[in-house]
Image (spheres, helix red, strand yellow):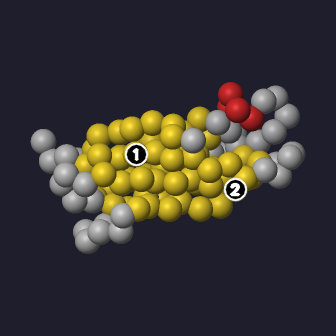
Amino acid sequence: MLLSRFNVQPTEDRQFVVDYSDRLGSTQLLSTLAAVIVTPIDTPPFTVTGLVSNAGTAVTLRVTGGIDGAEYKVELQVTTTVTLETWEDELIFIVEDL
């Protein structure tokens, strides 16, 4: 599911929070961020690191780099605690040196 689009500059180092609390309901949490997949792969790279929040209801991403004018798709794969589901979501990052 495409969650959102963001504009970033190639020299920025920014944090984004993806909140899953509405989808999780009252008894379930996120257990892991199983994968973060960035496409396309460029040089210099668009780097994304992430982790599940302490509360287990969100994923925090840190993004930096990329090539001016490029658009990157970031796929997140998260797993849940109660139903043991795997969800895959996408974010689009557009890199523009303004």
Q: Nearer the viewer, mark 2 or mark 1?
A: 1
Quarter assignment of residue 24: top right
Is residue 10 visible in the rendered structure shown here?
no
Tell which residue pokes out farthest to the bottom in this image. 43
Residue 27: % across, % down: 85, 34
Q: Which mark is residue 92?
A: 1
Instruction: Name the quadrant of the C terminus.
Output: top left
Is residue 29 visible in the rendered structure shown here?
yes
Residue drawn at the location 72% of the way across and 46% of the way down: 30
Front one among 90 and 54: 90
User: Mark 1 falls on what kind of element?
Assistant: strand
Residue 64: % across, % down: 32, 56
**Number of numbered markers:** 2
The amino acid on which the numbered mark 1 sits, given as a three-letter code, is Ile
Residue drawn at the location 70% of the way across and 32% of the way down: 23
Q: Are marks 2 and 1 in contact (CB under 8 Å)?
A: no
The amino acid on which the numbered mark 2 sits, given as a three-letter code, is Thr
| Chain-order first, disc 2 or disc 1 | 2
Residue drawn at the location 27% of the way across and 59% of the way down: 66
Q: Which residue is the site of mark 2?
A: 32
Residue 88: % across, % down: 62, 50
